[in-house]
Image: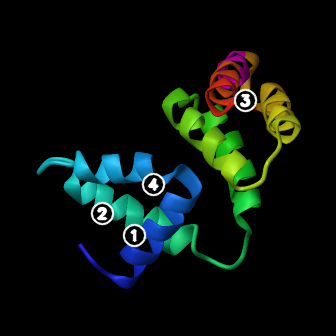
Amino acid sequence: MSSANFDKGLKIRREVLGSEYVDASIKNADDFTQDLQEFVTATCWGEIWGRPGLDRKTRSFLNLAMLTALNRPHEVKLHVRGAINNGLTKDEIKEVFLQAAVYCGVPASLDSFKIAKEVFKEMGI
């Protein structure tokens, strides 16, 4: 697929999540998942992440909080890495998860803390 939003989204997605992850996701898409990859890239990344209303750091803050609230550990892991790439510090990420503990529940926050520690270790920070 090639469209303005897909191309824009692919660029942003690679910058935030890393080319290796994004390229593998797209390469590994099959007949069942290809449409979803195209939708995510064009809509989530091209249309939403590409909007001028919020900077990427703010979008990362929001994603970490929402993904913690939804208790989506795989996506938390991915977006912790993206948050670091977007300029968040370990302390800022910690504050997001502490805030989430109050409003989303301690178990969800504990999972996010655990996942973030794994990402920090993988990234050497």
User: For the residue labelled by badge 4, is the local secondary structure a helix, a strand or a loop?
Assistant: helix
| Marks 4 and 2 close (CB-CB < 8 Å) | no
Tell me the CA gap for discs 1 and 4: 16 Å
User: For the residue labelled by badge 1, is the local secondary structure a helix, a strand or a loop?
Assistant: helix
| Residue at 42 percent of width and 67 percent of height | 10
Q: Which mark is residue 21?
A: none
Q: Which residues are magenta?
A: 107-113
Tell me the CA gap for discs 3 and 1: 29 Å
Q: Quadrant of residue 49?
A: bottom right
Single out the mark in the foreground, 4 or 2: 4
Q: Which mark is residue 19?
A: 4
Q: Is residue 111 above or below residue 84?
A: above
Tell me the CA gap for discs 3 and 2: 31 Å
Question: Residue 101, can we see it?
Answer: yes
Residue 122 lies in the magenta stretch:
no
Looking at the image, which is closer to me, 124 or 102?
A: 124
| Marks 2 and 1 close (CB-CB < 8 Å) | yes
| Residue at 79 percent of width and 48 percent of height | 88
Residue linked to disc 1: 42
Comes first in the chain, label 3 or label 2:
2
Q: Amino acid at mark 3?
A: Cys
Single out the mark in the foreground, 3 or 1: 1
Tell me the CA gap for discs 4 and 3: 31 Å
Residue 109 lies in the magenta stretch:
yes
| Marks 1 and 4 close (CB-CB < 8 Å) | no
Single out the mark in the foreground, 3 or 2: 2
Residue linked to disc 2: 38
Residue linked to disc 3: 104
Q: Is residue 51 above or below residue 12?
A: below
What kind of secondary structure does the magenta stretch mostly adopt?
Answer: helix
Relative side of 37 to 91, left or right: left
